[in-house]
Amino acid sequence: MGKLKILLLESIHPVADGLLEADGFEVQRAQGALKEGQLCERLEGIHLLGIRSKTQVTKKVLDAADALIAVGAFCIGTNQIALDHALKRGVAVFNAPFSNTRSVAEMVIAEIVMLSRHLGDRSREMHQGVWKKVATGSREVRGKTLGVVGYGHIGSQVSILAEDLGMKVVFHDTAARLPLGNSQPVKSLDALLEQSDFVTLHVPETPQTRGMMGAPQLDRMKKGACLINASRGTVVDLEALAQALKNEHIDGAALDVFPEEPEANVAEGFETPLRGLPNVILTPHVGGSTSEAQEAIGREVSASLSRFAHTGTTLGSVNFPQVDLGRTPDTWRLINVHQNVPGVLRDLNKIVSDRGANIHSQVLSTNAAIGYLIMDLDSDVAGQVVDDMHRLSTSISARTVA
Ligand code: NAI
């Protein structure tokens, strides 16, 4: 079999080319995001596709792709991909949800210091020609308490960096999380709000987190505390926050995310109740937008695609069941994707025994639509077994891996 071919679109970070070539892929590039028809044509003979947010991988595209086994979304979101249809076609989808963790954490740390010193206001005044040297209300962050709501990838990084600045860190998470450094879990959101000088939100968007910071929670915060939200826009009630800032219960806020965000950059007219309020930092969802994050995404998705193509591992896939199986020397590996209906494993195993082979090890995992199987045989008949598997009506795809 020749080299597996990967097509990269939308100016994916160039680090991907080197990594994929080193792993034995033939890398092809096309400019920008291709339209549906162009993409259908371009995918002929392509095994792996790399996209960012603008390429629409529709049902039609997936149906036209004759050799595709995986799509790598070199970004966070996967809404641009018809995920269910990809599943039915046996196409695994990968993304890079945590590659920008550090970038968000660094921005949050910067905002804690900026809010504590009212640097946004001082800078704006200077741009307007105003020299206003004041110390009133300006504080060091050393020794202050930071409350982290959601102690996952980003929240825990913020915690470590904040301790390096001499802050005391408390956190609240609905899941049991190992406290890093000297941070301390607190039993409830209310307990966190009552003791924190700064509150930073790092929760996902769920029905439980929607509006979790409303007027009652803002009231619970210490007078003069600051709020930072770089998680999801729906988590904070912005009208209530504007009110708490106007009546000076809250000293400052930094918002990177909003309940409704423009799809593309707009030159004017973005509205939020926080516009024009003092000591409020507003940023257009740039927490994770750094060149390092782009490179990390290039590395992470390339690695996921390469592992999947070469070993069948689906860890980190957004649509496939999570399956991993270590390699054993002198075994021959095959991968099978099949409809999740009764009796398939029996049929697959019969094919193997009919070929006179033994199964050294196998791992199967299913979701509602498909079963995903990695099988290692102790004799060199994986190619013939795969040919036989293709003939089963329940089989979606089958391939050997080197
Ligand atoms: P994560 O999944 O690693 O951590 C989220 C944590 O929140 C988990 O520990 C979870 O148990 C906890 N949690 C869930 N519901 C909770 C609740 N009701 N109360 C308390 N804790 C709760 O996610 P990660 O990567 O740390 O991301 C956090 C947020 O940051 C997400 O909303 C994500 O969309 C957002 N984000 C924003 C970026 C930006 O550019 N501003 C970039 C990257 C992520």
Image (cartoon, rainbow, N blue to C red):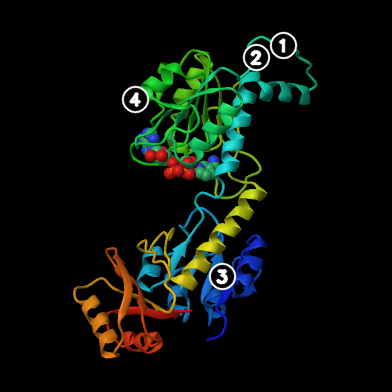
The answer for how far apart the CA atoms under marks 4 and 2 are is 31 Å
Q: Is residue 58 above or below residue 300?
A: below
In the rendering, which numbered label is found on residue 134?
1
Q: Residues within 10 Å of mark 1 (few under 14, many from 20)?
A: few
Q: Is residue 304 above or below residue 287?
A: below
Helix, strand or loop at label 2? It is loop
Q: Return the disc, 3 or 4, that comes first in the chain's sequence.
A: 3
Q: Amino acid at mark 3?
A: Lys
Whether disc 2's CB lies below 8 Å from ligand 1 is answered no
Q: Amino acid at mark 4?
A: Lys
Horizontal side of 97 relative to 206 (left or right) equals right
Whether disc 3's CB lies below 8 Å from ligand 1 is answered no
**Pointer 4: what residue?**
187
> CB under 8 Å between callouts 4 and 1?
no
Which of the 4 image quarters holds residue 318? bottom left
Q: Return the disc, 4 or 1, that comes first in the chain's sequence.
A: 1
Q: Residue at x 41, y 22 (%)?
A: 192
The answer for how far apart the CA atoms under marks 3 and 4 are is 51 Å
Q: Return the disc, 3 or 1, that comes first in the chain's sequence.
A: 3
**Pointer 3: what residue?**
35
Q: Return the disc, 2 or 3, that comes first in the chain's sequence.
A: 3
In the rendering, which numbered label is found on residue 138?
2
> CB under 8 Å between callouts 2 and 3?
no
The answer for how far apart the CA atoms under marks 3 and 1 are is 56 Å
x%, y% of residue 239?
Answer: 46, 26
Front residue of 131 and 20: 20
The answer for how far apart the CA atoms under marks 2 and 3 are is 53 Å
> Quadrant holding ligand 1?
top left
Q: Amino acid at mark 1?
A: Val
Q: Residue at x 47, y 73 (%)?
A: 61
